Image (cartoon, grey):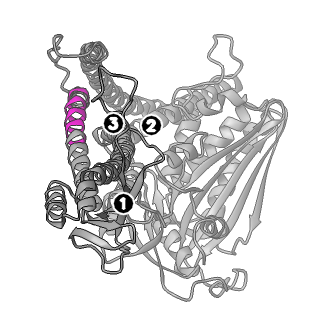
Amino acid sequence: MNLRKGAPRSLTHRLMVLGVMPALVMFLVLLVFFTSARLDDARKELYNSSQILADNLAPAVEYAVVSGNTQLLEQILTQTFKRSQVKWIRVTDVTDRVVGEVGNSPAEGVDATSDVFTADILQRPLDMEEDDDADWFEPVYGFTSGVIRLGTVEVGVSEQALVARQKDIVWSSVIVGLSLLAFTLLLVRRTLHSLVHPIHLMAERINTLMTGDYREAPVDRANQTSDVLELEQNLNALARHMASLKASRDQTLEVSETARERAESANRAKSEFLATMSHELRTPLNGVLGMIELIAEDELNPRQQDYLGTARHATEDLLTIISDILDISRMDRGKLALEYHDFDLRQVIENCVATYRHASEQQGLQLSLQLTGNWPGRSQVKGDAPRLRQVLAGLLDNAIKFTDQGSITVIAEWHYLEEQCMVLQCTVRDSGSGIPTDRMKEIFKTFEQLDNSHSRTHGGTGIGLALVQKLVELMGGHVKVETDLGTGSSFSFEVPFELREEVTDDQDRRPEPRPADPGSPNRSTRALVVEDNPVNQRVATALLTRLGFETDAVSNGKDALDRVRSSQFDYEVILMDCHMPVMDGFEATRTIRDWERDSGQLAIPIIALTADALPGTESACREAGMNDYLSKPVRKDKLRTVLSRWIRF
């Protein structure tokens, strides 16, 4: 399960946090520090003022206490109480008897909710200095042994006064701090806007460049920092460079398109020319062969018969080359169609090998045929017998041409696939010189030869193997090459065929159909076969059915894409042919993968089916998004092995 991450924060948010956090921390620290200092100062101020009040009030009430003038005492206490923030004032004599009080003094003499500040009422006698006649009336204040304590002044200060003062201090500090914080935020925001706004403009500029708009933007040199100014200038330089590249690309594409059209036109002209010339040459050659046959019926001496035989062979070789060229041109234009007729597969192979036996013996080579597998008594199949013979003849001709001594072995193996399908696996193995590894990709190219020098040992047109590969792929099979330089080469091809309905008399030699595999799924597992060749389509469908799948089949990539997108089907695997009309397997796979990513669907395993066995084909399939690779025709054991890598069944 994928965990969705939160959306990334903007640069403005990050910079705002970076700018505000220090200010907020500093604000809180200073607020706590100065508020606590002011609260402590307020407490000290209140306590000091209350003590000073008691100290000053004690001398003021001295006369009233001494004289017993309670009215004067009450007047002094009342005036003092009005001008102070104390809760109560009380005056007691030396016997602790209350002689005067104002405010809400406690009855018991103790107030737990108030702080009490006291000062003694002292009577200080006047001390005259007798030796000073001039300043006889200047008093000298001070304590002497004659100081008399008359009583005590008590001043009660309520905690509520301190709390009220503290509240005022806290609120004033908070208001001032919040004002400073708001001002800081506004200043930071304004500064950030001036920094981030150019970045947003550059981001929009990059988006316009990505959309293909390469116009240069004006640069504000007055209101931008040097760094931002340099970035904007670099973006303008990038825009100019990309505009230049776009113009160069458009020009290159135009030239390439023109060259492609010319190449296609030249290729079409070449194919049409080859087809026309082939047809035009076949007519006189057929006349030449006819006249040679007529001359051969006359009485000729041995020398004339030898000359005539040489002419006939040369003409037949030329006719074969022309036929091959005509077939190549038809394939390039997509106009070569196979024919489906009943024929004896074993007889075609044996006749073709027998045709080349004389040529191999003349070159001192031993040509042998081995029939392996479950060959029935009557090997009747449906297909194009002339094209099969052409494929085998091309491989035999190539083997004889490049083998100087030794042997050539043809191995033909019969494999049953299903009730009405079989596969011919044919191998032509020689003991020739072999093929260099670096030239493996070129042997199936049209008009390509291993030795292009004027002094080459072997002749030929270079279309034999190319024609073989195209014909095998057209019949739904593939060609495989194995070679060892200096030891020999082995060319193998596999082609599927349908069996004739009449071939039922040798059921004892045919393997009995096996029941469904024990590993087949209990539930219905759907598979899709995408194959344009009807024989291969039928073979793949039958094999998947035997493996326990419920199988659908379509003939091109577009139909496959429509089925995958439809909600009616839930395929667990797709067998995809690579080369098909309308939409090939590569494009269909890429489109399916794009749809899966866009719609959030799980990726369906896609197995490539291809007749191309050249190096690089498998990597091309995987780059297109396919999961695995199977060579045609499909074999049951190989199919089971590949499927087991991707699904459980």
Q: Which residue is mark 2?
A: 328
Q: Nearer the viewer, residue 465 or 626?
A: 626
Circle 3: element type:
helix
| Residue type, numbered disc 1 | Leu
Q: Is residue 577 above or below residue 21?
A: below
Q: Please identify, in this view, whether the residue under mark 2 or under mark 3 is nearer the observer.
A: 3
Q: Which residue is mark 3?
A: 19
Measured Cα–Cα span from mark 1 to mark 3:
67 Å
Give x and y (percent) for residue 55: 33, 50
Q: Which mark is residue 150?
A: 1
- The answer to whether the residue labelled 1 contacts the one labelled 3, judged by CB atoms less than 8 Å apart, is no
> In percent of the image, x 61 and y 72: which residue is there?
417
> In percent of the image, x 62 and y 17: which residue is there?
452
| Residue type, numbered disc 2 | Ile
Measured Cα–Cα span from mark 2 to mark 3:
76 Å
Is the magenta region chiefly helix, strand or loop? helix
Q: Is residue 561 above or below residue 331?
A: below
Circle 1: element type:
strand
Q: Earlier in the sequence, mark 2 or mark 1?
A: 1
Can residue 608 be seen in this snapshot? yes
Horizontal side of 121 relative to 646 (left or right) equals left
Q: Is residue 574 above or below residue 168?
A: below
Q: Is residue 449 above or below residue 380?
A: above
- The answer to whether the residue labelled 2 contacts the one labelled 1, judged by CB atoms less than 8 Å apart, is no
User: What range is drawn magenta here?
Assistant: 181-195
Horizontal side of 303 relative to 334 (left or right) equals right
Q: How many C-alpha atoms fall within 10 Å of the one at disc 1: few (<14), some, or many (≥20)?
A: some
